[in-house]
Amino acid sequence: FDGTEKEIPNSLGLEGMILDSNIGRLEYLQDIDLTDNYFSGSISPEIGKLKQLGRMVVDNNVFKSTVPDEITQLINLKELWLSMNYFTGGIPENIGALKSLESFSM
């Protein structure tokens, strides 16, 4: 890794599970945009380890389960887009604790 920023295009028609327990290993990740694919499964609680994450856009996929409470540990999160998935339950109660959050869609 040479430290330069790389951009992976979204909407590639990709499918499968992606935000599993290994996501916590990407501690310096700043941006997740998986829009318009067929990713499924759940978002692992390990997502809470991504303290540098400023943008998480996973709308229009087939994620299921609940939105993990650990998402509220992402103190630098400015954008959170979760719409057009199959999440059950509501949003984590303490989502309001994300003081940096500017844009939210579910």
Image (cartoon, rainbow, N blue to C red):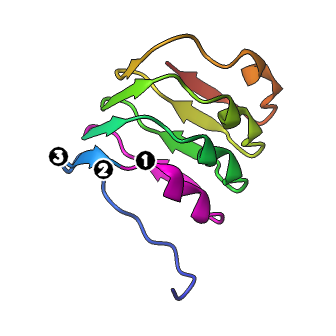
Decide if residue 11 is on the left or right side of residue 80.
left
Please tell me whether residue 29 belongs to the stretch shown in magenta.
yes
Q: How far across and down, in percent of the image, does residue 100 sit? A: 77, 36
Q: Nearer the viewer, residue 34 or 23?
A: 23
**What residue appears at the point 49 percent right and 18 percent down from the top-left corner?**
106
Camera-near label (3 vs 2) is 3
Q: How far across and down, in percent of the image, does residue 37 sit? A: 25, 40
**SS assignment for the magenta stretch, majority:** loop
**What residue appears at the point 55 percent right and 26 percent down from the top-left corner?**
67
Element on which disc 1 rests: strand
Q: Which residues are magenta?
A: 18-37
Q: Are marks 1 and 2 in contact (CB under 8 Å)?
A: yes
Q: How many marks?
A: 3
Vertical side of 41 occupied by 6: above or below: below
Q: Which disc, if any, is residue 13?
A: 3
**Of pointers 1 and 3, the one earlier in the residue sequence:** 3
Element on which disc 2 rests: loop
Vertical side of 16 occupied by 52: above or below: below
Amino acid carrying mark 1 in the image:
Asp
Q: Alpha-carbon distance for marks 1 and 3?
A: 13 Å
Q: Is residue 29 visible?
A: no
Q: Which disc, if any, is residue 10?
A: 2
Q: Are marks 3 and 2 in contact (CB under 8 Å)?
A: no
Q: How far across and down, in percent of the image, does residue 18 sit? A: 38, 50
| Residue 69 image-quadrant placement | top right
Q: According to the image, label 1 marks what residue?
A: 33
